[in-house]
Amino acid sequence: MLISGEVEHMATAGPGIFWLATLLFLLAYVVILSEKINKTKVALAGAGLMIVLSVVSQQEAFYSEHLGVDYNVIFLLIFMMILVGITSQSGVFEWTAVKLAKLAKGNPMTIMIYFVIFTAVASAFLDNVTTVLLVAPVTLFICDEQELDPTPFLIAEALSSNIGGTATLIGDPPNLLIGSKAQLGFNDFLFNLGPAVVVMMIALLITVRIFFAKKLVSDEAKRERIMKMDESKLIKDRSLVIKSCTVLGLTILGFCLHDLVHLQPATIAMMGAAALLLISKLDPHDILKEVEWPTVFFFIGLFILVGGVVKVGLISELSKFVINVTHPTEDNMFTTSIVMLWFSGVASAIVDNIPYVATMSPLVQDMANTVFHEGAHAAGALPVETLHHDVLSPVWWALALGSCLGGNGTAIGASANVIVLGIAERNGHKISFMKFAAYGLPVMIGTLIISTAYIVLRYYT
Amino acid sequence: MNVRSAILGNSLAINKETSVYDLVEKILGTNQTTAAVLDDEGTLVGIVGAHDVLRRMVPAYLDMGAKLMDLIHDGYFEEKFAQFQGMKVWSIMVTQMDSLDPDDSLIKAAAMFVEKRRKSLPVIDKDGKFLGMVTRRSILSKVFSSIQ
């Protein structure tokens, strides 16, 4: 909902306030990229200054859906963190991983394939960082037991986590941002991105086999160690497994039945988190400590920062530039889609894809406003018919594919990569920036090529 | 009373090229758990003890998945210890450590033990030369004997 006076403010933003907001935004962006100061601190400080310098009012920052904090994203993020936090305490993820290693009969290559698929599926429903935090310790343990170098496993898992997370609304934060701005639901993501992700996962499995097959050899005795493991010891509280898996499953089902239940994903996640807190009998203090609050506050700061440059018209100027370069029309946005895919891929390999998508999704909105309505609507107040227009939809999917998959290109391209490399180093297996790129970059380019073919075949033939 | 009065007479001190096996033997031969690591000039370059050896034997990933501990195969600990063969103490010693001055008061030393949760701390002079170790026990012993 547009709050009173918003349109007037946007129209009257003078050059002074335009440059002030732009400089503040760029400065925050550069400092976030430099990683010299924690990104949450930078985003919150930048957001605070946007209000203090009257770029946005506090009313807009806190209550405007389009210029301020997007609570759809914030609450979905928090409630999913609560749900996943409780479920991960049950030991079910470790149990599954060990069970898979046993199903692979201790064969290292088969274990890698199972773990890569498990990571991708888990990443589609949990966030990528949580997934790798759960999978990496078990991977290190299995490799230690088999006296294998865990590096190939960890790299393959980071890559599959980023690919798997692309498939759903809740799989990767950029999708949450796109889903909220474009009013796209869980099924929209699953049906539009899921098929592409399946193809990419098949390609990834073939690739890791080619990359690593020769390195993954173990003898009978070491395979036997895996087969002797009693995975039931990993489940400390059987009733918590049943309760948490049931609630998590029902929540995901709720997302899928969004059109039937007429509830937003954040509401469904809230019901799931509340139900699990009630039936698990766990202390909310302990559970809430596990929420990734720095990420939540990073989003809060980012929304206000981006709201500032939306309000002064910077995003609108950038959108005009995109229009001039890619010439989107009411009937065709092919060039825009392909440029969006590859530009997002390369950009996300270098910069954090969360601030990138936070900036790009209002840009796509603004572009649609110009192309379809000649700029008649206020920022972010586009009718849903426009947001879901057949001609515009491929641009949203290109943005999602590019920003999620681009993260695979470098060690710093995605949070999951940073976490995996940190865990590897702490366990005495340092993976250098170049080593990660040697595997990540070809996978990133390969998945972007698949995405290009997918977009062309699905939306333009 | 100052720290000098609580220095252990038989403080363990080793060279950084000492093997981890030799370190363990020396620890087992005394009632101390920490040794000072000195360079050829007798300057303190690190401390190392039973805790550092054990830390190397327990993989870091177990901190994140403590439940996995129950699935480790029999003989894992012994195999890990066998990997120390030929390893020198410099590879496991702690180099960022707190130290005491011989003229520091015992109360300052006691406060440092409480704050840092250490069992022993090295005492060095102004030139960084190692004078000996003080332990929680040696400080308590000094205080206790002074009131007897």
Image (cartoon, rainbow, N blue to C red):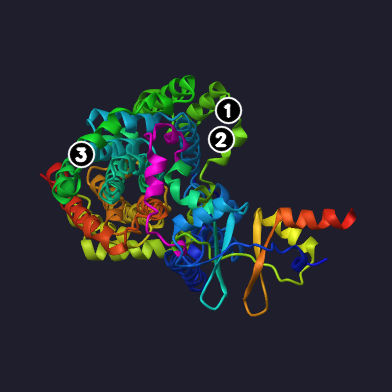
Q: Which residue is mark 1?
A: A282
Identified by mark 2, the residue type is Ile
Q: Is residue A211 above or below residue A125?
A: below
Q: Position of residue A191 (x, y in %)?
A: 25, 35
State which region is magenta: B65-90
Name the residue nearer the viewer: A415 or B33.
B33
What chain letter is assigned to the residue under label 1? Answer: A
- Lower position in the chain sequence, tag 1 or tag 2: 1
Q: Amino acid at mark 3?
A: Asp
Seen at 27% across and 43% down, the residue is A389
Q: Residue A40: in sight, yes or no? A: yes
Residue in the foreground of this view, choosing between A218 and B137 = B137
Say whether residue B65 is left or right of residue A431. right
Label 1: element kind: loop
The mark that comes first in sequence, 1 or 3, is 3
- The circle on residue A86 is none
- Residue at 51%, 30% (x, y): give it: A273
Give the camera-side residue of B116 and A400: B116
Q: Earlier in the sequence, mark 3 or mark 2?
A: 3
Residue A263 image point, x, y percent: 44, 29
Mark 3 or 2, closer to the camera? 3
Label 1 crowding class (10 Å Cα cut-off): few <14, some 14-19, many 20+? few
Residue at the farthest left position: A461
Q: Which residue is mark 3?
A: A219
Mark number for residue A287? Answer: 2
Type of amino acid under label 1: Leu
